[in-house]
Amino acid sequence: MEASICVNDISVSYGRKQIIDGLSCRAVAGDLTALVGPNGCGKSTLLHAIARVLPIERGQVLLNNIDIHNSPTRQVARKLALLPQGPVAPEGLTVHELVSQGRFPHQSLIRQWSVEDAAAIDKALKMTFLTEFSNRQVSTLSGGQRQRCWIAMVLAQETPALLLDEPTTFLDLKVQVELMGLLQRIARTENRTVLVVLHDLNVAAAFADRMIMMRDGRLVADGPVNSVFTAANLKTVFDLEASIVQDPISGRPVCVPNTNGFSTAAE
Ligand SMILES: Nc1ncnc2c1ncn2[C@@H]1O[C@H](COP(=O)(O)OP(=O)(O)OP(=O)(O)O)[C@@H](O)[C@H]1O
Ligand SMILES: [Mg+2]
């Protein structure tokens, strides 16, 4: 299931407003890559451009050296799945029906539903702990359960590349940790490319192999977490004064914001 994403010098605009300006980055097969940056910096726009939901004005997006913006839609959908930020479920769908939609790119006039489709759906439901909710209406689930349905739909698509825009929103910390562990396993054991937008920097640093940092539509850093997740980059990207310490158990970098400047305690 190998596929690496290579973004080469792309620019993206909404109308006349340019949002992404000459950005290059990559996500490698076998690695979990976190995409981080402040609100409004263009993370969702970048994911949409990679998945060719949005056109690019210049540059290229390559998936395994194939130019995505010049490939047929169905072919791209079999290779790359996108979970957008805050998706809205169509009314009246059950969990099983929603997750089944992930299999649509695999259907064709000559190839109808198969045992492989059923197996992929069951596997995705199991991985997201949703098997018992299979026949429930999506609209009756809690925010966290619903978020897991969307993740299951994307997993059922069984693509070599996965793009997830803030998949941990609405999830409690334990479920976030389980989901990040699942994404890390999928990337490593199935050699898939997993690119995830995250706001929790410490969750990102704890699970990701690589990190992409952006600000104002431009790349600031792209590389292994230890070389990107630095106090200097956090200052540049988020204007955040912080120290980086090491988790004594995992050895992973942890960001500790400097709160002195915000203290209002009377001396
Ligand atoms: N459809 C649109 N039309 C015009 N401007 C848009 C549109 N979508 C997004 N923008 C603008 O593009 C910029 C980047 O938005 P984007 O959604 O990519 O940011 P983001 O990094 O994902 O932010 P967040 O962390 O809040 O999700 C913002 O200034 C936003 O207002
Ligand atoms: Mg966004």
Image: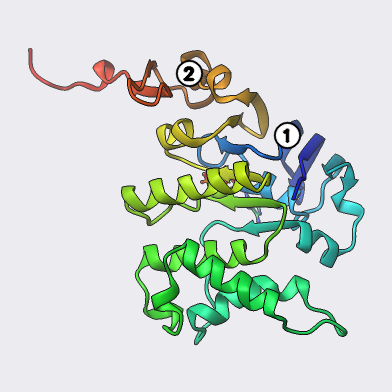
Question: Picture quarter containing residue 9?
Answer: top right
Q: Nearer the viewer, residue 70 or 13?
A: 70
Q: Secondary structure at mark 2?
A: helix
Q: Position of residue 162 (x, y in %)?
A: 65, 52
Residue 184 position within the rendered picture, expressed as x and y whole percent measured from the top left: 54, 43
Q: Specify whether residue 112 is in view.
A: yes
- The residue positioned 50% from the left and 50% from the top of the image is 182
Q: Nearer the viewer, residue 174 or 87?
A: 174
Q: Which numbered disc flags the more N-terminal residue, 1 or 2?
A: 1
Give the secondary structure at mark 1. Answer: strand
Quarter of the image with the C terminus in it: top left
Q: Is residue 195 visible?
A: no
Under mark 2, the amino acid is: Lys
**Label drawn at residue 162:** none
Q: Residue 21's image quarter?
A: top right
Disc marking residue 235: 2
The amino acid at mark 1 is Arg
Mark seen at residue 26: 1
Where is residue 4? Give x, y as percent: 76, 41
Q: Residue furthest bottom?
A: 92
